[in-house]
Image (cartoon, rainbow, N blue to C red):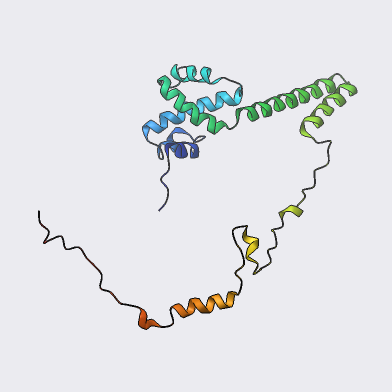
Amino acid sequence: MAKELTSYDKIEMVLFKGREEAATFLSERELQQKERWMLCVSKLLEDPMTADKDMVSFLTAGCGGSCEPVSTATAYRDMAAIRRLVGNVQLAGKNWYRYMVIEAAKEGIRIAKEAKDPKGIAANADKIGKYTRADKEDEEIDRSGWEPPVFEPSDDVTLMGDGFKPIPNLEEERKSFRALFKNDSDILDVEPITDDCDGADD
């Protein structure tokens, strides 16, 4: 049986869709959630270092007048989902600063070109090379450790651990064990015992 989608799953699937398209998939309550979440995701992508308390205030104030205000409890529930959508904020923050440095270096190259400043062009190009690691060779991946271990069959039970010990005279033990069940005349067939509750005294 297919697993039923949660509200989070459904909203995530249509997060970047328009309202009309999303409305065919979401309830009215989920549409309102989607709109709040989308605004908050955009806000966090613009400034990944925004604190949760500021985001909660943003939600309880109606996202700058774009949505209906929500309670503080709802805002914190929303934040759990929003943080999930945005991903790791520290990683997002690092990526954001890397992006800003690269964009600034590109702008620096443009200005240096206009000023006919080759040193400025080289310095900014060097900065881009450093942050994109374009000046380094691609690392070869060592795949030798990816090979599965080779197991060899063995009849040595001690390989299974200290609790396992070999049985001396194993064949004799097997014969005596088989002998216990060889003579079926000693086996008694018994009738099952059932409790008859109908005739019990009250």
**Residue at 12% over, 59% down:** 200
Q: How many marks?
A: 0
Dividing the picture into quarters, in which one does residue 27 lie? top left
Give the answer, above or below, for where 193 lies relative to 89: below
Answer whether residue 62 is visible to the viewer in this image. Answer: no
Answer whether residue 53 is visible to the viewer in this image. Answer: yes
Q: Residue 155: x and y, percent?
A: 64, 69
Q: Residue 84: x and y, percent?
A: 53, 33
Give the answer, above or below, for where 144 lies relative to 175: above
**Residue at 86% over, 18% down:** 115
Viewer-side residue, 49 vs 119: 49
| Residue 147 left/right relative to 198 | right
Q: Residue 201: x and y, percent?
A: 10, 56
| Residue 200 left/right relative to 104 | left
**Residue at 74% over, 24% down:** 101
| Residue 141 left/right relative to 10 | right
Viewer-side residue, 65 vs 172: 172
Q: Residue 94: x and y, percent?
A: 68, 27
Viewer-side residue, 53 vs 161: 161
Viewer-side residue, 189 vs 115: 189
